[in-house]
Image: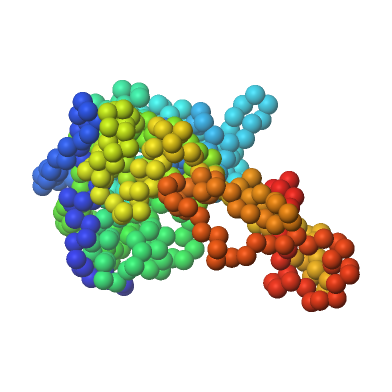
Amino acid sequence: MFVCSTGSPRASRDNMVSSNTTEESDGKVENTKPTELPAGNYTLVSWDLDTTGSRLVDEICQIGAYTPTSSFSQYVMPYRDLTQAARRRHNIRIITIGRFRMLKDVKRGRVLKTKSEVSALTDFIQWLSEAKGDKDGVVLLKHENRKIMTPLLLEALGKYNLMDDFRKVVVGFADGYAFAENKCAKSVRYFTLRTLTSILLHRDDQELDHAHNRAQAIYEVATNVAGLENLDAIKDPEKGPKNLAILVDALRPFTLTVSEEENSLVNLRATVVRQDSFRPVFAAMLSRNSRERQRAFNLRNILVGAGLNYESTRLAHEKSGVEGVKTLVSEAVQAKVKDLDDLVRILMEHFAPEDYPKSVPTEKIVRNGNRRDSSGKRVRVKSESKGKKIQNGEVTVGSIGEIGAGDAPSDTTLDTTASSPCKLVTSSTQSGDSSPPPLENEVASADSSTH
């Protein structure tokens, strides 16, 4: 059996969740210290969800839960369609037959039996109540790094006024990811469920596409990490209750109460509101390529993490202009100098576009299968965008305001002395000149319509 050695407590309970906070009137949040889950006789239930996506507005597609003595699995028919990433992750998609929408298992090729979200949640609470029995409560064990399943579950329960019934049964949420990261820090590098299933349980072909499969794997991985050999140690009629108490006690430092998770949900809602407020600022970057979009997400997260929103930056600009924005960002944000400069520039491009024109990409390299050199090989064609101009057969670069965002500040100048302009190659020069072809088989095209 693979045994995890206890490493440094990198995933301590204080930093296990990004924030356990309550929202204040100014949009900022104040950190509160988590409370210890009191010792007691609890039932441990592992669980997971299949969802239409990873945002707070997404819906549940399947609820899966597991204990060594019973399990729960119920598919839910969502109103919204699944994202492409969710379809690939769960191998399910929504199909339409006539006037009816159905959930289909793509991998197994069968239509799934579904219920409405409120019916599935009601059945889930009822099953948890039966699993609790005469014990003090249920501890729900999850295994995820992004921490989105619990907010989605609480959001759905609150939508149908089921939180009171849920609190009567469930006392807390245990984090199996943080538990494994703390115990196996010296022996395992990655702590995803698939990696731990392969290393600890020796199952390389474990199916983890559906929630009920992952729920069982979560329970088995936690049992192994806690030092118990397998589930037989929990199922044993004599030693089972004692071993279960050992497992629950080992998970207690990584468990948050239901009220703390509700506070985290309040903070997550406030974070989403602040993110949406910056949408006009980063709209241009979000409409470009994937690299620019990822850069926009990172910069926006820096502002949101510092507790800033659109209104606070707008007031700073109205009061003191660019100096006010610089002061606000430098005092509130802790980031690299380049990130701070980019944030100030992007904010000023939005608030003062006449002084800070928005930057656009200048050049793209496209493939043209019809272009070949004198030896018959295909060549790469550089397609010039609006940022380049053709004068007297030479290609020159436009102003600095036309370069891609993040390449250079708008108050600098572009140095073109290091490279010589590209000459246009015409058909007459190719046929009349017997000199060898250009280096690297590249020619510059004056036609910008090839984009």
Q: Nearer the viewer, residue 332 or 5?
A: 332
Q: Residue at x 23, y 70 (%)?
A: 5
Q: Position of residue 156 (x, y in %)?
A: 36, 30
| Scheme by which the image is coloured | rainbow
User: Residue 154 at x, y = what percent?
Assistant: 31, 33
Say whether residue 55 is left or right of residue 102: left
Would residue 417 appear left or right of 329 to someone viewing this image? right
- Nearer to us in this view, 342 or 415: 415
| Quadrant where the N terminus is found in the figure | bottom left
Tell me which residue sits at (75%, 60%) in the image. 424
196 relative to 289 in the view: left or right: left
Q: Position of residue 333 (x, y in %)?
A: 26, 45
Residue 243, by quadrant, is bottom left
- Rendered location of residue 29, percent (x, y): 21, 35
212 or 134: which is nearer to us?
212
Between 249 and 380, the one lying in front of the other is: 380
**Extreme-front residue of the structure:** 392
Residue depicted at 45% across the width and 34% down the height: 353
Q: Left or right: 60 with respect to 10?
A: right
Q: Is residue 274 visible?
A: yes
Q: Say if 420 sits above or below 276 in the image.
A: below
User: At 37% across and 30% down in the image, what residue appears?
Assistant: 277
- 316 shown above or below 39: above
Report whether residue 112 is seen.
Answer: no
